Image (tube, coloured by chain):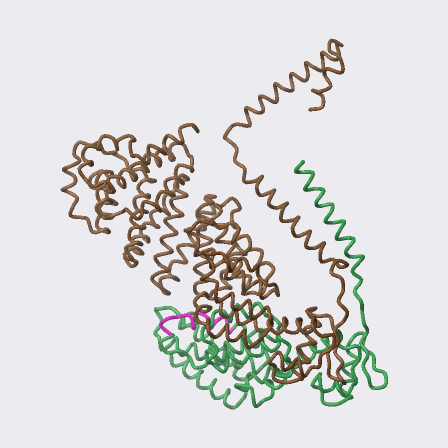
Chain colours: A green, B brown
């Protein structure tokens, strides 16, 4: 157990020094050490103290991987932590970081636009309204769904973020809402002055707007007004194919009946 | 064989069959309900024996159906009497049953009474399991959950080892109560039975035991959903195939769970389909009211989430009206698109929604309320300022309103444009619905449903065994007749006109 404790201390030291690369290296050693103690999966044979330490180490690992922008590693840590959170013995002294980790996972799912998984995880949580870490992604999801993008924008400002790990998602989030707003604008406005577009898209300067316009298909700038190409979907051709398809199927069915 | 059916049923009810008659004189001294119950259980024995020898599941089903009426009459004394009568002395399971229901000391006494009656030397597994099942039901009714769970665990182990096709229907009942006991005991017990259920599911699948397979899948789904393990439930659904020929009740139950999983994962269309067939397939009798209520609740929420307004007649149905009232308020709020009314309905009934496990789903409705609100405004006004929209929807700022409206336009909720400089929303002219594809899609949906219904009913038809051989024979004869006829025509003995009628049938 001594080796684990020693490694754990050096892990904490490097996390405090914000040296996440070293921390990640220590983590891989630690995981091996934990494996030797049979503590990577909670079981009744392993002393509870060891399991608590293991849980803390894995949580630290998860946070480290967030800082390193390694989202896959974070998902793995999250999956590994699940049995620890479900264990009834361990839940007598619940981890302080549990809600933080879950909240971060929810946020990750949100940025990946995996909404169905998001709700699946949410269903597992009870009384999440009280916790600031879980509440944050939940509120973000609600605003995103109803379209209050300005609230999302405000929430991503550093003063509203529950902890610095959450701040790391800000960029991805803003990019994805900007994308959403752009697709909405295409449909909602016939044209839009660049000045207004700057506000709407949360961009800093008009130059950034012009740059953004160039990255989109079918957007044109004339006299500092953006014109959106109005594409009318040609439904009629598609529908005739549909009708034929359906009618043939009816005929087939009728044939089996008669 | 088939003609015997109704007469057996009568015998079972009056208890006049086989050895029941021999003991009739002894039992007449006791009160009537006891005699009736004892005789009914004994009648079940005959039916089960027949089921075992003839491999006909219908006899077993008849026995299982009678349990619901029987369970009200069961007392430990009756069970003890039956057990003492049936099992050969020294049989292990007899001792076990008696000690479970607390009647172990009465053994000797009753033994003396029945010395004359003949005892089967071998125990029929079906009847053995049936008696155990009765004990399970009895313990459940007595609310002896702990003892029931222990008893069921042992019973399940026993049933798991037996490999008899005639046991299938009984075994599924046994598992049902097994899971029920553990569910009533709460969380750690609930989780602990999963391995056993999964192992049994594997065995059942290998043995092509359709009844048990269907029962176990529904039990597992229920188990997972009870602890909100949606992901595991979903994986189970993906990895297994629910038997199509399962009993209707089980299909309805499975549909309900699938609907719930899909609703949580935002697949509303799929969820609605599952729930519609769940409510349609569920038995409409009084016993299934609880299920119907639960299914309707979920269905209402899913319909609302899809942007539809549920049929008002559902809320008027006497059996559902009371349970659905909170949902009715919810529907009303969503229909008019008022956020205040929605939150009022939500807050006053939060406890109900939480109890039904639908709170998180109901929470998702907020955006629907907003969308409906926007749609109402777009229909009413040809032009409305963003400021007014903001006030009416109870949103915090005009900017929010602008984004929300833009998103509604993108999602196809309304057909309108926004004028940013002047800050208003301009609705486009209403288009004629009949010029679009919508009516056709609706028709298609209905036709598809009718077709599926027809196909299902064809599949559900039952034919008497071996009847086709008879028909084959008939067909053979008919063909021979035709051939003769054709030959005769060729020979020119019959006029063309006369034979015409027969040929149309060819």
User: Number of labelled discs?
Assistant: 0
Question: Percent x, y for residue B132?
Answer: 30, 46
Q: Is residue A85 magenta?
A: yes
Report the front residue among B229 and A63: B229
Q: Is residue A113 visible?
A: yes
- Quadrant where the image shows the C terminus of chain B: top right
> Up-down: is B198 above or below B51?
below
Question: Percent x, y for residue A101?
Answer: 50, 78
- Quadrant where the image shows the N terminus of chain B: top left
Q: Say which residue appears at 71% left-offset and 72% top-offset.
A: B409
Question: Percent x, y for residue B298?
Answer: 51, 62
- Magenta region: which residues? A77-90
Question: Which residue is at the far right?
Answer: A223
Q: Is residue A188 visible?
A: no
Report the front residue among B326 and A234: B326
Q: Is residue B343 magenta?
A: no
> Up-down: is A52 above or below B241?
below
**A198 relative position to A65: left or right:** right
**B73 relative position to B471: left or right:** left
Question: Percent x, y for residue B226?
Answer: 43, 63
Majority secondary structure in the magenta region: helix
Q: Say which residue appears at 76% left-offset and 15% top-offset.
A: B496
Report the front residue among B73 and B263: B73
> Up-down: is B367 above or below B25?
below
């Amino acid at each position: 157990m001594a080796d684990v404790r020693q490694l754990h201390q050096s892990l904490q030291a490097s996390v405090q020094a914000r040296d996440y690369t070293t921390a990640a290296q220590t983590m891989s050693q630690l995981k091996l050490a934990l494996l030797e103690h049979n503590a990577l999966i909670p079981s009744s044979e392993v002393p509870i103290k060891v399991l608590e330490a293991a849980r803390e180490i894995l949580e630290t690992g998860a946070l480290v991987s967030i800082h390193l922008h390694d989202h896959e590693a974070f998902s793995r840590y999250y999956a590994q932590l699940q049995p620890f959170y479900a264990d009834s013995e361990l839940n007598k002294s619940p981890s302080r970081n549990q809600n933080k980790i879950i909240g971060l996972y929810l946020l990750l799912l949100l940025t990946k636009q995996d909404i169905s998984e998001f709700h699946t995880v949410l269903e597992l949580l009870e009384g999440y309204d009280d916790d600031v870490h879980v509440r944050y992604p939940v509120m973000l999801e609600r605003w995103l769904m109803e379209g209050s993008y300005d609230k999302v924008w405000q929430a991503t400002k550093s003063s509203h973020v529950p902890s610095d790990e959450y701040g790391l998602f800000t960029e991805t989030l803003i990019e994805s809402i900007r994308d959403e707003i752009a697709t909405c604008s295409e449909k909602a406005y016939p044209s839009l002055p660049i000045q207004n577009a700057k506000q709407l898209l949360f961009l800093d300067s008009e130059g950034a707007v012009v740059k953004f316009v160039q990255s989109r298909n079918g957007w044109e700038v004339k006299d500092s007004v953006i014109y959106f190409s109005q594409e009318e979907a040609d439904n009629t051709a598609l529908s005739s194919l549909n009708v034929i398809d359906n009618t043939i199927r009816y005929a087939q069915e009728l044939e089996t009946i008669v | 064989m088939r003609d015997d059916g109704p007469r057996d049923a009568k015998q079972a009810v009056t208890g006049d069959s086989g050895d029941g008659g021999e003991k009739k004189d002894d039992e007449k001294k006791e009160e009537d309900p006891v005699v009736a119950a004892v005789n009914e259980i004994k009648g079940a024995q005959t039916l089960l024996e027949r089921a075992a020898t003839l491999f006909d599941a219908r006899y077993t089903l008849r026995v299982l159906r009678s349990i619901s009426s029987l369970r009200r009459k069961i007392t430990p004394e009756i069970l003890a009497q039956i057990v003492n009568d049936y099992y050969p002395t020294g049989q292990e399971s007899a001792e076990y049953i008696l000690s479970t229901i607390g009647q172990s000391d009465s053994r000797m006494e009753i033994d003396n009474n029945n010395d004359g009656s003949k005892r089967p030397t071998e125990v029929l597994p079906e009847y053995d399991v049936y008696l155990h099942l009765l004990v399970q039901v009895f313990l459940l009714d007595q609310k002896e959950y702990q003892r029931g769970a222990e008893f069921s665990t042992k019973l399940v182990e026993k049933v798991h080892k037996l490999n008899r096709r005639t046991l299938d229907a009984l075994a599924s009942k046994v598992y049902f109560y097994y899971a029920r006991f553990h569910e009533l005991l709460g969380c750690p017990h609930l989780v602990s039975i999963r391995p056993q259920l999964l192992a049994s599911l594997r065995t059942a699948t290998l043995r092509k035991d359709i009844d048990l397979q269907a029962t176990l899948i529904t039990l597992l789904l229920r188990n997972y959903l009870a602890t909100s393990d949606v992901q595991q439930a979903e994986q189970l659904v993906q990895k297994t195939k629910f038997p199509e020929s399962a009993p209707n009740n089980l299909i309805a139950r499975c549909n309900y769970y699938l609907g719930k999983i899909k609703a949580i994962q935002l697949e509303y269309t799929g969820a609605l389909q599952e729930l519609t067939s769940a409510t349609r397939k569920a038995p409409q009798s009084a016993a299934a009211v609880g299920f119907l209520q639960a299914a309707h609740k979920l269905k209402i929420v899913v319909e609302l989430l899809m942007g539809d307004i549920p049929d008002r007649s559902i809320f008027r149905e006497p059996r559902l009206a009371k349970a659905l009232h909170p949902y009715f308020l919810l529907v009303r709020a969503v229909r008019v698109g008022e956020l205040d009314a929605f939150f009022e309905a939500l807050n006053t009934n939060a406890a109900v929604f939480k109890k039904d496990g639908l709170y998180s789903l109901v929470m998702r409705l907020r955006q629907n309320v907003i969308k409906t609100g926007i749609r109402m405004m777009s229909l009413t006004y040809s032009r409305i300022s963003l400021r007014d929209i903001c006030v009416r929807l109870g949103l915090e700022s005009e900017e929010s309103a602008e984004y929300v409206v833009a998103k509604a336009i993108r999602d196809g909720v309304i057909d309108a444009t926004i004028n940013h400089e002047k800050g208003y929303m301009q609705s486009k002219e209403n288009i004629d619905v009949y010029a679009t594809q919508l009516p056709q899609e609706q028709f298609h949906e209905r036709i598809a449903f009718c077709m599926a219904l027809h196909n299902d009913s064809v599949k559900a038809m039952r034919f008497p065994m071996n009847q086709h051989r008879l028909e084959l024979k008939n067909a053979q004869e008919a063909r021979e007749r035709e051939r003769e006829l054709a030959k005769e025509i060729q020979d020119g003995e019959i006029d063309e006109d006369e034979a015409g009628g027969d040929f149309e049938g060819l």
